Image (cartoon, grey):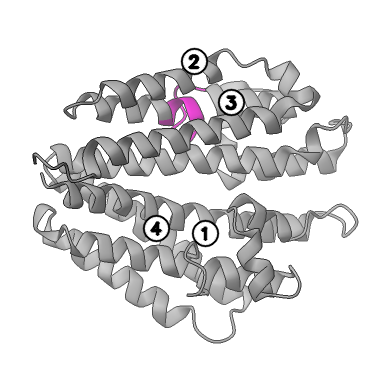
Amino acid sequence: MLSRVAENLYWYGRYLERAEDLGRMINVNGHLMLDLPRSMAPGWAPLVRITGSQALFDELYDTPGERQVVRFLLADPRHPGSVLSCLNQARENLRAARDLLPREVWEQTNDLYLIAQEQLTGNLSKRRRQDFIDLMIRRCQQLIGMLADIMSHDHAWDFILLGRYHERADMTTRILDVRSAHLLRGVDESQPFDQLQWMSVLKSLTAYQMYRRHVRLRVAGPDVLRFLLGNPLFPRSVVFCLGAMAERLEELPDHESTLIAVGRIRRQVDQADVEALVEGKLSTFVDRLQLELIGVGELIRQTWFEVRPDA
């Protein structure tokens, strides 16, 4: 497979996952703002911090209100990480590699972008954005289901999933870092509003029902942290994502250095002292994980996407 095609497929997986994750976060934050008293509501600014795009937001908007943040994250073409931009990038990356995938996948991806372009114009009422996000999430899941069902599970499939789980691991750590920061600073978790906020952390990752099934305890910070970092059976936990990346890497040639780097992150998560993280070390821990994930991305680029002189 040509290096540029492999890169297109990897980024197709990443952008599709990013669009879906952003949609989930916007939905959950909207519900949380309705459930919490105004004095305790986190506002909309944390969503900008989760995406790491604070500088660009400050350049484009004056205040981090609901209308401004939702427009920035959902529909602003000037923001390369908005849902609209992600769906466009997914489409363009797939266009360059469309000969390797079933025609139906290209048609669905193109159609999803055109729907987004049409529906994310003008005034975005709460009802209108809710309808679009629900549709977009279903379409993203349908696309992955189609790929799993009707695409050959060869190296092209490996690169799509590698990108998907790389993006998901990164997003899970970002949500934990920003969402959990003030909840882990000695707040009394017996308070119902604190439990609501921990539930929002879980729901941002569509993890609430599986948490209740596996943990069978009331929602509490340390348990949520253990589940989202280290549960090997839940597809959005960091450990699960790293394991899925390792499986895909083992199918690719020249994978040794990248597989070692992924294994190193896995050991850090496995050996993490959750009690210490609760006491204030979570941000430092997550920063280290994110740097390691960036390093993995760089190794992926160097190993498979760079054109070598002897190639």
Q: What residue type is labelled 1?
A: Gly
Locate residue 92, reporting x and y percent. Answer: 27, 66
Q: What residue type is labelled 3?
A: Phe
Quick one: SS at disc 3? helix
Numbered circles on residues, count: 4
Name the residue beneath numbered marker 2: 267
Residue appearing at x 72%, y 59% in the figure = 45
The answer to the question of whether label 4 and label 3 lie on touching residues, with beta carbons closer than 8 A, is: no
Nearer to us of marks 3 and 2 is 2
Locate residue 241, reporting x and y percent. Answer: 42, 31
Task: Kindly identify which numbered label has been placed on residue 23.
Answer: 1
Quick one: SS at disc 1? helix
Q: Quick one: label 1, few (<14), some, or many (20+) residues within 10 Å?
A: many
Q: Which amino acid does label 2 sit on?
A: Arg
Q: Give the range drawn in magenta.
A: 231-241
Name the residue beneath numbered marker 4: 138
Nearer to us of marks 4 and 1 is 1
Along the viewing direction, whichever of 167 and 151 lies nearer the viewer: 167
Quadrant in the picture for residue 262: top left
Q: Quick one: label 4, few (<14), some, or many (20+) residues within 10 Å?
A: few
Nearer to us of marks 4 and 3 is 3
